[in-house]
Amino acid sequence: MRRDHIIMIRRMDRLIRMKATGNYLEFAGKLEISPAKLYRLLDFLKEDLEAPIFYNKHRRSFEYEREGCISLGFGLVPLPGKQMERLSGGSGYNYSDNFSLSHHMRNDRYNIVALK
């Protein structure tokens, strides 16, 4: 995906979340693109990214069916509460008693050598 497409999709996402897109022609005008390009980008968001976008006739704006946003890039995502409750941080486990580390100077890497 090209950088200009990523920037455009981020702008689209912001306007959709603000519920300030207007109709197709107004939305395309705000993005300074042709209506045909807007159709293609909206199809990409709906079909490929499965974004739940629809046009609200009463508000005269594109919206998401449920709260959310489009995030293009790398990041860490927090786990939902139930998944967090099931995680164990290893309390009560003494890691230093159960494996040893070795440093190899040639390739400057640490490797686990052996489990005891």
Image (cartoon, grey):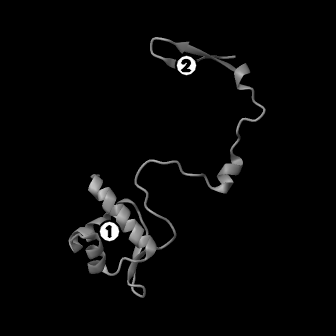
Q: Disc 1 marks which residue?
A: 42
Q: Is residue 107 left or right of residue 6?
A: right
Q: Tag 2: residue type?
A: Asn
Helix, strand or loop status at disc 1? helix
Residue 40, horizontal then vertical, whole percent: 26, 66
Identified at 32% across, 59% down, the residue is 7
- The crowding category of the residue bearing disc 1, from other C-alpha atoms within 10 Å (few below 14, some 14 to 19, many at least 20), is some
Query: Looking at numbered disc 1 in the image, what kind of residue is underneath it?
Result: Leu
Classify 16 as above or below 49.
Answer: below
**Residue 21 left/right relative to 83:** left
Q: x and y percent of residue 106 in the render?
A: 45, 11
Residue 67, percent from left and from top:
52, 69
Mark 1 vs 2, N-terminal side: 1
Q: Which mark is residue 97?
A: none
Query: x%, y% of residue 6?
Result: 33, 57
Question: Where on the picture, by quarter, is residue 59?
Answer: bottom left
The quadrant in which residue 33 appears is bottom left
Residue drawn 23% across the image and 74% down it: 35
Which quadrant holds the C terminus?
top right
Marks 1 and 2 in Cβ contact (< 8 Å): no
Q: Which residue is mark 2?
A: 111
Assess disc 2: are there few (<14), some (14-19) or many (≥20) residues with their C-alpha within 10 Å of its C-alpha.
Answer: few
Q: Is residue 19 above or below residue 10?
A: below
- Give the image quarter of residue 36: bottom left
Report the residue at 35% width, 80% height from top.
22
**Closer to the camera, 48 or 14?**
14
